[in-house]
Image: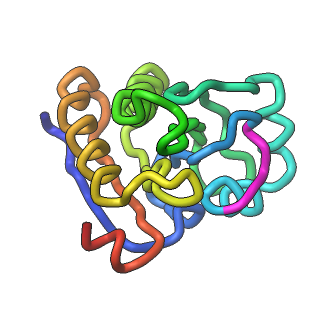
Amino acid sequence: MNATLECRQGDIARQDDMDAVVNAANAELRPGGGVAGALHRAAGPELDRACRPLAPIRPGEAVITGACDLPNRHVIHCLGPVYGVDEPADELLAACYRNALELAEAHDIKSLAFPAISAGAFGYPPAEAARVALATVIATLPDCPHIERVRFVLFDTQSAEL
């Protein structure tokens, strides 16, 4: 693996130096709260229009759009599992990260930033979500030779420390 992994506290909608950002989306790919709300607000109404023909998506799936008014080229939208509802949760969460990386590779994206998928309103325990995310990214990157940098962008200090 030749890619650099980074972790920082910050705003996923303000990752100006990344080719793509990952949206912790809802099934309909609509604006909402949390990450989806922040990205849709920053990207403007064109992102909602770009997402509509791609919805709905299922847990573990990922789709890609342009980034509209965001400073990035693309947004990769992933639907993480609702903890305790969508099973097997660990496999579905891993699929989000794997599918996002594979889409990035297919679109010649060299850098992408992930939020903590499913660790907010979807109730996934943060430490377990971090373990699944990191293990999956490390396991998948050798199959994605064009990806040079993966960043985990976490909203608060406690999540960043995990």
Q: Residue at x 66, y 45 (%)?
A: 67
| Relative depth, front residue between 86 and 56 | 86
Position in image of residue 42 (x %, y %)? 72, 62
Q: Main secondary structure of the magenta part?
A: loop
At x 23%, y 31%, the residue is 141
Q: Is-magenta flag for residue 27?
A: no
Say if residue 87 shows up in the picture: yes
Indicate left or right for 106 with 56 as reference: left
Q: From what the image shows, is residue 105 above or below residue 72?
A: above
Q: Quadrant of residue 58?
A: top right
Q: Is residue 59 above or below residue 122?
A: above
Q: Nearer the viewer, residue 66 or 64?
A: 64
User: On the image, which quarter does residue 125 sit in?
Assistant: bottom left
Left or right of 79 on screen, residue 143: left
Q: Name the quadrant containing residue 88.
A: top left
Residue 86 coordinates in the image, percent (x, y):
52, 32
Quadrant in which the N terminus is drawn: top left
**The C terminus, quarter of image:** bottom left
> Magenta residues?
29-33
Q: Residue furthest left?
A: 1
Does 30 lie within the magenta span? yes
Color style of the picture: rainbow
Q: Residue at x 34, y 50 (%)?
A: 129
Residue at 14% across, 38% down:
2
